[in-house]
Amino acid sequence: VQLVESGGGLVKPGGSLRLSCAVSGLTLSDTYMTWIRQAPGKGLEWVSYTSNSSSTGYTTYVESVKGRFTVSRDIAKNSLFLQMNSLRAEDTAVYYCARATGSGPFGHSDYWGQGTLVTVSS
Amino acid sequence: EIVLTQAPATLSLSPGERATLSCRASQSISSYLAWYQQKPGQAPRLLIYDASDRATGIPARFSGSGSGTDFTLTISSLEPEDFAVYYCQQRSDWPTFGGGTKVEIK
């Protein structure tokens, strides 16, 4: 199993960025996925949670990114995306994609990507 | 939001010693708690899920216990590669993480 994120970089406040997560060894359409971020020197925060239902999945978001971030999937390419708009300085973090697994609510993450750094600064 | 409080913030121990890390939830989370290990520059690694189940490939020196609001991660005898930051995570409600415990070499 391998998850590889890309698309991070430096962006000005108010700008946009699209992160990608290429998944191999897992079938995205059968898998619950999450984006988790970690601000520099700080702890971890769940950003989004995408179910395996339908072709697009159903995604829920942490309150602080609702209306600004959107998750999408390309099942044919087995890839997950995080579209981030109206970026703020507090969105600066390493963003990880990870599998969410476990019976019951939400999940724990057993497979993680290496992370991609997003820096929001003027 | 369910708040997880980890203690202590830093644990200074020597190789071979026993490490006991605590995670307390602001409300009952049943057994929906996981523990992760993170080393500098790396993604977190799942150690324990559902409070006490070891993840695949995790050595037996790592064990988890607890339910409700109080949880413990125990490392029975520290190996050099165990010095790292440890996070707990709950999934009873929108998932949240504790602030972490750094296990450092004394």
Image (cartoon, coloured by chain):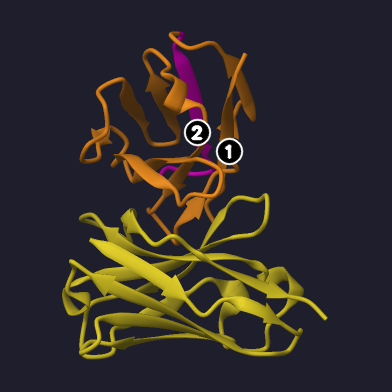
Query: Which segment is the magenta one?
Result: B17-29
Chain drawn orange in the picture: B
Q: From the image, state the color of chain A.
A: yellow
Observer-nearest residue: A78 or B76?
A78
Q: Which kind of residue does numbered mark 2 sit on? A: Cys
Q: Nearer the viewer, residue B49 or A97?
A: A97
Say if mark 2 contacts mark 1, CB within 8 Å: yes
Q: Is residue B54 above or below residue A85?
A: above
Residue A65's x, y, as percent?
59, 78
The residue at 20%/90% (across/down) is A76
Three-letter amino acid code at the position of disc 1 = Thr
Quadrant in the rendering for residue B8 = top right
List x then y, in percent, for residue B82: 44, 26
Query: Could you tell me which quadrant the N terminus of chain A lies in?
Result: bottom left
Q: Which residue is mark 2?
A: B23
Residue annotated with mark 1: B5
